[in-house]
Amino acid sequence: MSEKRDFAIIGTGAVGGFYGGLLQQAGFGVHFLVHHDYEEVRKHGLVIDSINGNFRLPHVHAYNDPRLMPPCDVVVIALKTTANSALPDILPQVMGAHSHALTLQNGLGSEAEIARIVGADRVMGGLCFLCSSKISPGHIRHLDYGLITLGEYRADGQPGGITPRLKTLKTHFDAARIPVRLVDDLALARWKKLVWNIPFNGLSVVLNQTTDQLIKNKSTRERCSTLMQEVANAAAVCSRPIETEFIEKMIADTERMEPYAPSMKLDFDRGNPMEIESIYGNPIRAARAAGVDMPETEKLYRQLLAINPIV
């Protein structure tokens, strides 16, 4: 990665605006691609209310057209996966000859989709453990956490290992006070996140409940547990075994969590399209290709498709 250490943030919402704001505050060159909030961010910058300290960036490099952006060393994709149809027009504009792409998107399949545009050897993936929301144009509230789990993508599905460029990226994020954990198997990390995301995202929508309500009720808790085990079974046939203790830990962690509406519930309540294919459709198809069905997950998938807002 170039010593210039410039970052392009593709999607300046709760995730991209927060992490991009921290990078700019730490002195890195950051260029934000902004959609709905462009005029506000261009004129007034970004405001971040954070449990780690509030700050404002009155001047940011904001763009509403990727053709106007300079090539950057690291291109961070923080769009919702429902907007990925725009990526073939965006990424070639902001990636130079030595740029790398880092996707922070939810679910399964984001890296492969981006690799088809820029090449597999230029793609890294990150999983965000973050409670953050955009409360008004250019204004982000960070409620808790912030860890990014980083790993290398490989087109052959094998673990990518912890490479020098991952370590370099971690030093940049460390300088911006962004907590990072490096993993040698990105695919396993994604399946592990799905163990939680598949039950709690979808059920929070179809049952109109927060995480604490889902875990306290005996019936919904059992359904969550069944879905978690089904995801673990699917991961195993995809050569990513997940230990039973991990599921038990996820349930215990959710019991201790503050009442929380997952991102899919927030999207649904706002009338926005939900990330159904990346969180449900892609894992179902991956498991089926490996010879295993996910009947409970598919039931939830079809319920979500039936109520997905059409925008």
Image: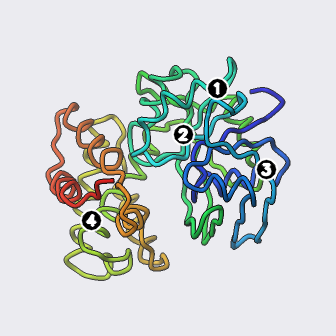
Is 88 above or below relative to 202? Answer: above
Q: Is residue 15 above or below residue 219?
A: above
Q: Disc 4 marks which residue?
A: 225
Name the residue: 55% across, 31% down: 90
Instruction: Indicate the position of residue 71 as horizontal and vertical percent values.
Output: 70, 27
Spot occupied by residue 192 in the image (x, y as percentages of width and height): 41, 50
In front: label 4 or label 1 = 1
Q: Secondary structure at mark 3?
A: helix
Determine the secondary structure under disc 4. helix
Amino acid under disc 4: Ser
Which kind of residue does numbered mark 3 sit on?
Gln
CA gap between label 4 and label 2 equals 29 Å
Q: CA distance from mark 4 to mark 3?
A: 41 Å
Which of the two marks, 2 or 3, is nearer to us in this view? Answer: 3
Write down the residue under mark 3.
24
Q: Is residue 205 left or right of residue 81?
A: left
Q: Secondary structure at mark 2?
A: strand
Residue 103 is marked as 2
Q: CA distance from mark 4 to mark 1?
A: 42 Å
Q: Residue at x 40, y 62 (%)?
A: 267
Mark sitting on residue 95: 1
First in residue order: circle 3 vs circle 1 = 3
Q: Quadrant of residue 73?
A: top right
Residue at figure coordinates x 48%, y 75% from the top left: 257
**Could you tell which of marks 4 and 1 lies nearer the N-terminus?**
1
Residue 234 is drawn in which quadrant? top left
Say what amino acid the circle numbered 2 marks. Answer: Thr
Q: Nearer the viewer, residue 156 or 47?
A: 47
Quarter of the image that includes the N terminus: top right
- Per the model, the C-alpha gap separating discs 2 and 1 is 13 Å
Residue at position x 19%, y 77% in the image: 219
